[in-house]
Image (cartoon, grey):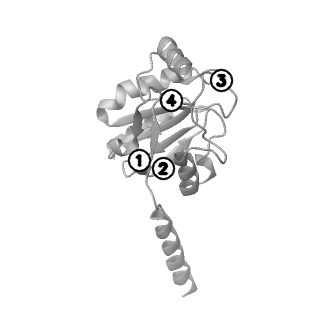
Amino acid sequence: MKKILLIIIMISFFSNNLYAYEKLAYDFSFRSIDEGEINLANYKGKTIVVVNVASRCGFTNQYEGLQKIWSNYKSEGLVVIGVPTNNFKQEPGSNKDIQKFCKSNFNISFPMTEKTNVIGENAHPFFKWAKENYGISAAPKWNFHKIIIDKDGKVANTFSSITKPSSKRFIDYIENQIKN
């Protein structure tokens, strides 16, 4: 009897946590680097990769892999959004500088936000939401931290800076998300 009660409590606990989201990713928007708006509601039903980026980081070459997965999978429902940040003191330039760097060095065509805080009290509400709903692993520890949003608008997974967008593990995960 105790085992059954324990199982019921565990199922209740986990099923409630599955629906704990008061908001979804679709409730957020960013200011675009080119002065428009990136409204995540426009990407309902798609897999979204939100990555905090910086031009003076040891991981900056990951821009190439991000552009490649964007080019290869955007027609299948993948969206990549780059979020430049100077939280780790590696993106000192203006939005125009960042845009020029990304275009000239990596030919970036995926959506980019204006320079934004991703950690701390002044973090963009999307990053606060991700951490509140997914836990500490959603909070960027460094540049090129990847947050995967599933087709239901919830955090599906996160990948640290050391995981390259070209890695088999990352690509397999993205492909699985797109197919489901």
For disc 1, the marked residue is: 150
Q: Are marks 2 and 1 in contact (CB under 8 Å)?
A: yes
Q: Earlier in the sequence, mark 2 or mark 3?
A: 3
Q: CA distance from mark 4 to mark 3?
A: 24 Å
Query: Which numbered disc covers residue 13?
Result: none
What secondary structure is found at the residue carrying circle 3?
loop
**Label 2 – label 1 distance at C-alpha:** 6 Å
Q: CA distance from mark 4 to mark 1?
A: 17 Å
Q: Amino acid at mark 3?
A: Pro
Identify which amino acid the numbered label 4 is placed on: Pro
Q: Which residue is mark 2?
A: 155
Q: Determine contact: label 2, label 3, CB under 8 Å.
A: no
Q: Which residue is mark 4?
A: 165
- Judge the density around disc 4: few (<14), some (14-19), many (≥20) Cα neighbours within 10 Å: many
Rendered view: 100 above or below 57? above
Q: Earlier in the sequence, mark 2 or mark 1?
A: 1
Near-viewer residue (7 or 27): 27
Q: Are marks 4 and 3 in contact (CB under 8 Å)?
A: no
Report the amino acid beneath label 2.
Val
**Vertically, is 146 above or below 105?**
below
Q: Residue 175: where, in percent of width, then height?
A: 38, 37
